[in-house]
Image (tube, coloured by chain):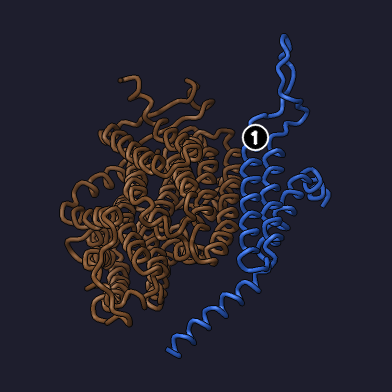
Amino acid sequence: MTSLANQILSHWNYLAVITLMMIGLYIAISRGNLVKKVMGMSVFQTSVILLYVSMAKVTGGTAPILIEGRDDIIYSNPLPHVLMLTAIVVGVATTALGLALIVRINEAYGTVEEDEIVAMDRAEDERDLRSEDAS
Amino acid sequence: MSDLASHLPVLQVLIPLLAAPLCFLLRKEAIVLPFTIAVSFACFAISMNLLSQVLGGDILVYEFGGWSRPYGIEYRVDILNAFVLVVVSGIAAVVFAVGPGQARRVIPEGREYLFYSAALLCLTGLLGVTITGDVFNIFVFLEISSLSSYILIALGLNRRALMAAFSYLIMGTIGATFLLIGIGFMYQATGTLNMVDMAHRIQVLGPTKGVLVALAFVMVGISIKLAVFPLHHWLPNAYSYAPPLVSAFLASTATKVAYYLLIRFTFGLFGAALVFETVGIDRLLLPLSIIAMFVGSIAAIYQTEFKRLLAYSSIAQIGYMTLGLSFATQAGVSAGLIHVFNHALMKGALFLVAACVTWRMGGTNLDVMKGLGQRMPFTMAAMVVAGLALVGVPGTVGFVSKWALVSAALEVDALWIAFLIMASSILALVYVWKVVEIAYFQTPEVELERREPPLRLLIPTWILAGAAIYFGIFSSYAVDVAELAAQQVFMVGL
């Protein structure tokens, strides 16, 4: 039991990753408001940054700045941090594009609620069908 | 000159990448259009050259900054990705050459340069995913191509294009993030990002928990991008509301690149033994592919809009490709690759026909296509040719793919699968016939004169439709390359 508790406590950052990831994914799937969807997606993407940074940590390691004449220093792995700089850029671009699309959707439909948009599309389809029948 | 030749792998990606912002700066359509065409043909020429260099079995490695693996990033060209590069850049060259003949109806006057910028960025991303030998690079290029394809889809005339692009953005981002998580686990397990290095280390590690989790995330991520059956939800809306030109480009390239990734990760990184024997992904992929073949085709039969019909047919055709992979044999992979090439030709041609119809009628509802067989004979003839290819009539590329698939099925003693492939072809005949019947045997409500779209639109359509016949009759070239690629994948792994 204690070993299990230990394992959980020693991996608390991974627990945070999983929690954030699931919160983000759940919001992106379940919310009808498009802005909330984008925010959920953004949380989901951000959780991955924490995952990568966690795996870069070396116990007792310090920032990877080489000091001349010292070879007894343990460094953290810098590569995942660099990868995440790219992932942050990708995340920002995706969020920006998502929000820009929402602005356009709001201009076209007058709402950002998914169920209202679906209802408007459906009403349009039915109108088309009726006008076809009439002609 | 020889110096330049050694830089061809990087030029393949660099040229469209630099051309995209240049389009943005040049602005004037009279300059941007020829420029885009020149760039896409240059890409096509480079990919043909790369393919000819690797066909002998050599593998081209391009090291960035002279840093060799595992430290540096490298581009790695073998027969498999050279083949996909040729398909992607070839389709891009043909489709971009159409230019504004179609785009003008879709994009506000004077804003065309934005279309070209996004299209070239999308091409950059797709080529980059294909050529790179570094797994993190795959993620970055995949996002470049995805972000620009969301923009391209949102250009559609109907306001529903916006919602289609938005749902694709959410689904696509979740897929790409899954891939990123998988790559993270792979890196954690192996400590490298280079594909060759990683493959060796995974082989040594065997099926550890980290590798298996990585495999799960990567496969789901790619399957979303590929639109494998239960994850295909984004595809019909995206293809049917996007401008037809964009659908023609994306339908024949984006899913093909995702299929390439599936093969690359299966054979090149995780290894066939791990994926098929230890995990048994084929046992999941096989039923899903077969369901996709039937669900896609049956849904296509009930559509009342031409592009939507083609989109559902795409889901069925993707089913054929993943079916080939799920046999886990060399013949199966080679059949899948042949279908990648063939499907790119016929779907490209069919969506360009949709572009012609949009140019003439302003939409592609099947109602407006009544009697177009007599009013736009050349366009509709292309539709019939590409449609027959979709069914798999002998003399077209479709027959070549079906033949390869059926023989791959018989090779693993799966007579029932061979039978199901035939049965789903009959469903394809039903939806293709539905369109043919409307175009040739129904009379339009308003009498129209006979008028073809401009040659700029008609010639690319016929290039693809013609290629669908040419490679159906002289099938050996494409088939040989696909077989060599499958052989290399099986023998060398990477």
Give the colour chain A carries in the figure: blue
- In the picture of the structure, the residue carrying the numbered disc 1 is A80
| Residue B296 position (above or below residue B280) | below
Residue at 23% from the left image edge and 46% from the top image edge: B480
- Give the brown chain's letter: B
Residue at 56% from the left image edge and 45% from the top image edge: B211
Image quadrant where one finds the N terminus of chain B: top left
In the image shown, does B489 or B445 lie closer to the viewer? B445
Image quadrant where one finds the C terminus of chain B: top left
Residue B302 at x, y percent in the picture: 40, 78
Quarter location, residue B167: bottom right
In the image shown, does B435 or B87 lie closer to the viewer? B435
Residue B162 placement, left or right of B275: right
Residue at 40% from the left image edge and 28% from the top image edge: B61
Instruction: Specify the farthest residue to the top.
Output: A69
Residue at 54% from the left image edge and 35% from the top image edge: B193
